Amino acid sequence: MPAREHLLLGRTATVLDVVIPVYNEETDLEPCVRRLHHHLSATFPYGFRITIADNASTDRTPEVSARLDDAIEEVTAVRLERKGRGRALRTVWSHSEAPVLAYMDVDLSTDLNALLPLVAPLISGHSDLAIGSRLARSSRVVRGPKREFISRAYNLILRSSLAARFSDAQCGFKAIRKDVADRL
């Protein structure tokens, strides 16, 4: 791989595009997007966009997404007619002009204060990819024993069969540099 370079931030107004893939989230979508927008407006030192990627919802999610798109300048809504988080990320990320791409689950279960530390190494050129983890010793996670067992078992299989060096493949909190995403 070629040496990483610092991002030339003066060339783009939008440095970060945060994608929120959703399916039938009419109730939670608006308060979560408004909370994320407020947080980024108050704390993120660069231009950003929040992209709602609607994965063929059958409830009022498309209407809520369109309303947020109209009401908030930094919010964009994209409708996909077929379900799939990977499909949503590929579609949105391939059309984004932001040099740093991220995604998070609509429930915003990850502390929003972790967003800047997640993307800072990508902006600086230190890293190509960043993966959040709920399995770190310092993480404070509240979930049921069944979900905890399934998550840990899945990650154990992933690490042992693919020799993955990350600890939480299922965590809905990841970021990647656009140039790297394009190559992948």
Image: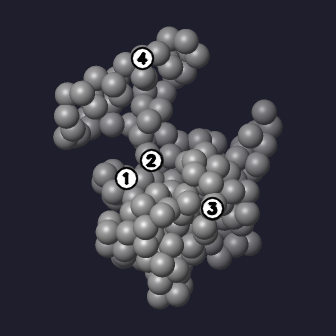
Q: Secondary structure at mark 4?
A: helix
Query: Which residue is identified by label 3?
Result: 80
Of mark 1 and mark 2, the one earlier in the sequence is 1
Q: Secondary structure at mark 1?
A: helix
Marks 1 & 4, CB-CB < 8 Å contact: no
Q: Please tell me how crowded label 3 is: few (under 14), some (14-19), or many (20+) other residues with Cα within 10 Å.
A: some
Measured in 3D between alpha carbons, the distance from the residue under mark 1 to the one under mark 2, in whole angstroms, is 9 Å
- Type of the residue with mark 2: Phe
Query: Which residue is identified by label 4?
Result: 156
Mark 1 or mark 2: which is in front?
Answer: 2
- Type of the residue with mark 3: Leu
Task: Return the residue nearer the eye: 34 or 11.
Answer: 34
Q: Which quadrant of the structure image shows residue 14?
A: bottom right
Marks 1 & 2, CB-CB < 8 Å contact: yes
Query: Which residue is identified by label 1?
Result: 114
Q: Position of residue 110 (x, y in %)?
A: 33, 51
